């Protein structure tokens, strides 16, 4: 399980996590979402369906270079089911999977201090490596989101080096992420320095399923920078190609 440091836990979170993985209709499931606030009553949250991460947007800030941000996380389901529902994206601050992911989808050491871009890249790498993404059936963790007066990740870069280092470093490294995701403006002939592509094949997409298919299923067009509404995530049905599981999610 990968989490942020500032989390609260439900009783028996480990046992419940394993149960969700076993109940997911996949040989290689990943359970992930944006958990509720740390003030949430996780005993009560266990009685209702968990929020699901559905909504991508192309960032509009100049500092984020049109990278995908994941913003739509809501309680879409009126009924809690035994089977985790399919989801298009993972959240870096909470995911549960078999430890095989550390071998099959190893973390890229050439992405220092990346924040935005980490989640969409890891989602695509996991899916193309044969992993299916699901939201939890119910929330097992709470997340302390705001944390006023606590240091943030970009401030740690400034403390370690000097003020102003983070933004240009992020802009540079984001080109590696965008290349892997198929942004045309970040193709190999467009990017310098070429060292940004060091060991790129070792830490990029899997060979089980195609990136093009993933982007189509989740509704992302990297050429036009458009998000195409797909509806399957919000309505809780399996994505295209997984219709054989429809009966599991009928209420």
Image (spheres, rainbow, N blue to C red):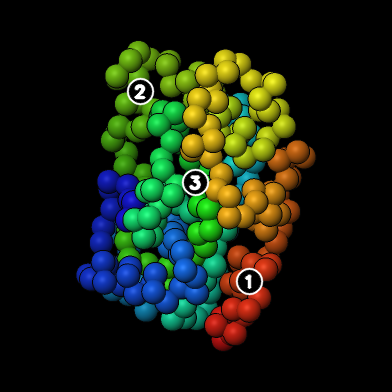
209 horizontally vs 153: left or right: right
Mark closer to the chain start, 1 or 2: 2
Quadrant of the rendered structure where residue 60 is? top right
Q: Mark 2: which secondary structure?
A: helix
Observer-nearest residue: 56 or 100?
100
Mark closer to the chain start, 2 or 3: 3
Q: Mark 1: which secondary structure?
A: loop
Residue under numbered circle 3: 122
| Residue 232 in the image, given as x and y percentages of width and height | 65, 67
Q: In the displayed structure, would residue 172 be above or below residue 88?
A: above
Decide: few, some or many residues near mark 1? Use Cα within 10 Å; few <14, some 14-19, many ≥20: few
Decide: few, some or many residues near mark 3? Use Cα within 10 Å; few <14, some 14-19, many ≥20: many
Quadrant of the rendered structure where residue 192 is? top right
Q: CA distance from mark 2 to mark 3?
A: 22 Å
Q: Mark 3: which secondary structure?
A: helix
**Residue at image x 66%, y 25%?**
188
Residue under numbered circle 2: 157
- Judged by depth in the image, the label closer to the viewer, 1 or 2, is 1
Q: Is residue 57 in view?
A: yes
**Residue at image x 38%, y 55%?**
100
Residue under numbered circle 1: 242
- Judged by depth in the image, the label closer to the viewer, 2 or 3, is 3
Mark closer to the chain start, 1 or 3: 3
| Residue 21 in the image, given as x and y percentages of width and height | 39, 69
Q: In the displayed structure, would residue 42 be above or below residue 125?
A: below
Q: In the displayed structure, would residue 200 be above or below residue 89?
A: above
């Amino acid at each position: 399980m990968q989490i942020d440091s500032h989390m609260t836990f439900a009783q028996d979170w480990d046992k419940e996590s394993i149960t969700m993985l076993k109940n997911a209709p996949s040989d290689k499931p990943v359970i992930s979402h944006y958990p509720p606030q740390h003030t949430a009553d996780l005993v009560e949250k266990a009685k209702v369906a968990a929020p699901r991460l559905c909504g991508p947007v192309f960032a509009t800030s100049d500092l984020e270079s049109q990278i995908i941000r994941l913003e739509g996380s809501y309680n879409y389901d009126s009924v809690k089911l035994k089977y985790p529902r399919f989801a298009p994206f993972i959240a870096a601050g909470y995911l549960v999977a078999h430890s095989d992911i550390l071998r099959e989808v190893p973390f890229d050491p050439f992405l220092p201090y990346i924040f935005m871009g980490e989640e969409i890249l890891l989602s695509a790498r996991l899916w193309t490596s044969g992993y299916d993404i699901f939201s939890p059936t119910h929330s097992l963790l709470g997340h302390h989101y705001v944390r006023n007066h606590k240091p943030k990740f970009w401030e740690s870069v400034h403390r370690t080096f000097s003020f102003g280092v983070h933004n240009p470093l992020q802009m540079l490294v984001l080109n590696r992420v965008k290349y892997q995701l198929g942004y045309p403006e970040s193709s190999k002939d467009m990017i310098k320095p070429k060292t940004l592509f060091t060991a790129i094949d070792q830490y990029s997409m899997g060979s089980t399923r195609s990136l093009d298919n993933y982007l189509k299923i989740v509704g992302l067009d990297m050429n036009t920078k458009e998000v195409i509404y797909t509806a399957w995530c919000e309505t809780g049905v399996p994505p295209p190609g997984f219709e054989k599981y429809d009966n599991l999610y009928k209420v």
